[in-house]
């Protein structure tokens, strides 16, 4: 990879850490508002191998918040758009594309081979639980984003263990399902502590569609929840930062000063 491209990152975390990122193998599942932003930062940070997973296509309503969505990409598969963007940012990154819907059958392919980290950015309950359970029981490192929709305050986004999260209806439902399947502590998540009132159910679990749902191109019902680009972007960036901390070492991202604290001057950038 071109060392000049990652000069600013090398200056901050060192050559060894950046070289390590070049060698890491990461699976990211879900390329929507959160997953797309997370992917963007991982590619720009120098992660050298990525398996990207999403069954969906770009829709017109995605444009308000999804980095992969433009008027030019509407109708295209999210994985193909993501692959093109990865190659435009870092042509030396190896990309594997899986345009799959996540379920108990497809998780075997998604988690196949040598993997350093799985990133869950799925917004549907049952597929999310299937992926988290499969990775957990295979002892594959996985991190996850909880619900970013319905939130208005990006300053309330938090990092913590799934079992310790609060204020998130999706996290509550995920915890309940996973506990019944024998999944315990050890999955770190990005979540919002902002209180919202919503009962989270997968649309396919509903007997009838209501005004909060629409039919996707694949014939599956999708929840239509209000969301802001500012909040979903913060979720995605926090998820990427958590991923980098897992791929390297938490102390690299501990906020230690890289300049003399006794100096009268601080870095301008």
Image (cartoon, helix red, strand yellow):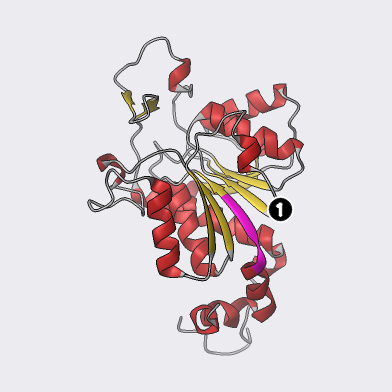
Of 169 and 242, which appears nearest the observer?
A: 242
**Residue 96 pos. (x, y %):** 54, 54
**Looking at the rendering, which quadrant does residue 249 occupy?**
bottom right
| Residue 62 appears in the rendering | yes
Give the residue drawn at x 42%, y 9%: 207
Displayed quadrant of residue 46: bottom right
Q: Is residue 203 above or below residue 147?
A: above
Locate residue 38, reporting x and y percent.
Answer: 49, 55
**24 falls in the magenta region:** yes
If the image is split into quadrants, where does the N terminus sit?
Answer: bottom right
- 37 left or right, relative to 174: left
Image point (38%, 28%), residue name? 223
Write the residue at 63% across / 74% down.
Answer: 18
Q: Nearer the viewer, residue 258 or 204?
A: 204
Q: Position of residue 110 (x, y in %)?
A: 61, 42
| Residue 173 in magenta stretch | no
SS for callout 1: loop
Label count reads: 1
Residue 163 shows up from this direction: no
Residues rendered magenta in the picture: 23-27
The residue singled out by tag 1 in the image is 114
Which residue, as the protein is rendered here, is positioned at the far left? 71
Query: 139 or 87, which is in the foreground?
Result: 87
Q: Residue at x 56, y 33 (%)?
A: 128
Vertical order, 188 against 16 (above or below): above
Circle 1 packing at 10 Å, graded few (<14), some (14-19), many (20+), is few
**Position of residue 157 measured from the top left corner of the image (x, y, whole percent):** 51, 48
């Amino acid at each position: 990879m071109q060392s000049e491209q990652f000069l600013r990152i090398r200056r901050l975390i060192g050559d060894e850490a950046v070289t390590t990122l070049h060698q890491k193998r990461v699976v990211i599942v879900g390329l929507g508002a959160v997953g797309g932003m997370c992917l963007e930062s991982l590619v720009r940070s120098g992660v050298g191998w990525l398996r990207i997973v999403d069954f969906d296509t770009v829709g017109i309503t995605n444009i308000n918040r999804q980095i992969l969505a433009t008027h030019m990409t509407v109708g295209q598969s999210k994985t193909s758009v993501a692959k093109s963007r990865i190659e435009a940012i870092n042509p030396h990154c190896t990309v594997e594309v899986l345009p799959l819907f996540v379920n108990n059958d497809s998780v075997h392919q998604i988690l196949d081979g040598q993997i350093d980290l799985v990133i869950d950015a799925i917004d549907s309950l049952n597929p999310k639980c299937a992926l988290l359970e499969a990775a957990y029981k295979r002892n594959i490192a996985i991190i996850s984003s909880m619900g970013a929709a319905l939130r208005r305050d990006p300053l309330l986004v938090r990092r913590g263990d799934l079992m310790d999260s609060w204020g998130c209806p999706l996290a509550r439902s995920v915890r309940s399902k996973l506990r019944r399947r024998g999944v315990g502590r050890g999955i770190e998540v990005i979540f919002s502590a902002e209180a919202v009132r919503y009962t989270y159910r997968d649309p396919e679990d509903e007997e009838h569609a209501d005004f909060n749902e629409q039919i996707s191109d694949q014939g599956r019902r999708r929840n239509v929840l209000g969301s802001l680009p500012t909040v979903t972007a913060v979720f995605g960036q926090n998820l990427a930062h958590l991923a980098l901390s897992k791929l390297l070492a938490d102390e690299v991202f501990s906020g230690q000063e890289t300049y003399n604290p006794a100096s009268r001057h601080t870095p301008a950038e």
